Amino acid sequence: MQKKHITIIGGGPAALMLAAELDTEKYEVTLCEKKKTVGRKFLVAGEGGLNLTYHAPLEELIQQYFPGAFMDPIIRRFTNEDWISWLHALGITTFSGSSNRVFPEKEWKPIDVLNAIVTRIRKRGVHIRTDTQWLGWKEQGQLLFEGWEETETDIVVFALGGASWKVTGTDGGWRKEFLERGIDVRPFQAANCGFAVAWTQEFLSAHEGKPLKNIALRYRGQVAKGELVISKLGLEGNAIYALSRLLQEGLQSESQVVIHLDLKPTMSHEQVQQKLRNSLLTKVTDILKKDLNLDSTAIAIV
């Protein structure tokens, strides 16, 4: 029996995962990526630490996604534990870091993780076409590509990504093609993003690029633990990324929002006060540095 042909358009994590799991005994599978290599944004994400998943109970994990109701049945069918087991089956070992985030072991660089997944895809007989950009549809409805005269496909899967990193190919240009075809697509909105803070030039000169580690942020009753990085424009880091959706909602109705930063989330308010009362030091900066173990960046913010 002749196999049906599936064309996957896109070369990011979703496309690669699908290509790695489709039954190539039943389907002829072709993956089309417009850049010279697949997984370019995957590698960019890995530059800041390749956070693979969140090691937490399922109910808590689902709350990390939005809209949760949409993702709920999907995550229940393939959980974070299933994902970790899938990686382990490829030989990719992992560990749980701070705030229950899961990363590859140190000997596994992001490119090694990507190569392991691509190797699985190729071994399964999937055709990977790079430098093959989807341009839309022909008048008769067939797919139109630059770099490939595709003849016929039975099933098309669009895994095209957002508009967050143009240099990697994630430019959101496909939305125009969908709209012209009458397919409604919501405007793109940033997900994990930094937020502007009006730092003084004096503060930036001393602390730009410096991290604030093991902190907690609170906004509208939600708490996010992790790390922040002082950037020229404001704050970056996994702690503020976790609150980005709520912060954006707040900024839709206000010109600015106030977040609460806890530099010592493992200590109670009473414990901090006791440290301050019992200190033998007299200078505030010395007390913060030696009794509360705050670094110069944290002290500057205080």
Image (cartoon, helix red, strand yellow):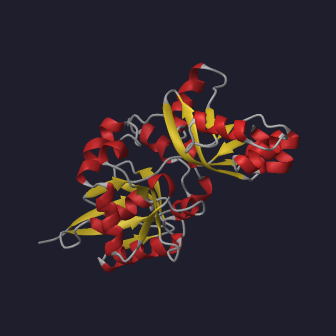
Q: Is residue 268 left or right of residue 60?
A: right
Residue 59 visible in the shown view: yes
- Residue at image position (72%, 35%) is 197
Q: Which residue lies most toward the bottom here?
A: 123
Q: Is residue 240 left or right of residue 292?
A: left
Q: Position of residue 128 (x, y in %)?
A: 40, 71
Horizontal relation, residue 285 to residue 149: left or right = right
User: Is residue 188 visible in this depiction of the protein?
Assistant: no
Query: What residue is rendered at 71% in x and 47% in y?
Result: 291
**In the current view of this chain or complex, which residue is farthest to the top?**
253
Judging depth in this view, the residue of 202 and 288 nearest the camera is 288
At a point 88% along the width and 42% down the height, the residue shown is: 202
Please provide percent x and percent y for residue 152: 29, 62
Nearest the eye: 53 or 101: 101
Measured along the vertical axis of the image, is residue 11 above or below residue 290?
below
State the quadrant of the N terminus. bottom left
Q: Which residue lies at the image location 60% right of the left edge and 59% below the top edge? A: 48
Residue 216 is drawn in which quadrant? top right
From this view, report whether residue 128 is shown above or below residue 74: below
Name the residue at the right extreme: 202
Please state which of residues 122 and 148 is positioned toward the viewer in this rendering: 122
Give percent across and percent down for residue 261: 63, 36
Vertical comparison of 58 with 121: above or below: above
In the image, 59 versus 141, the foreground residue is: 59
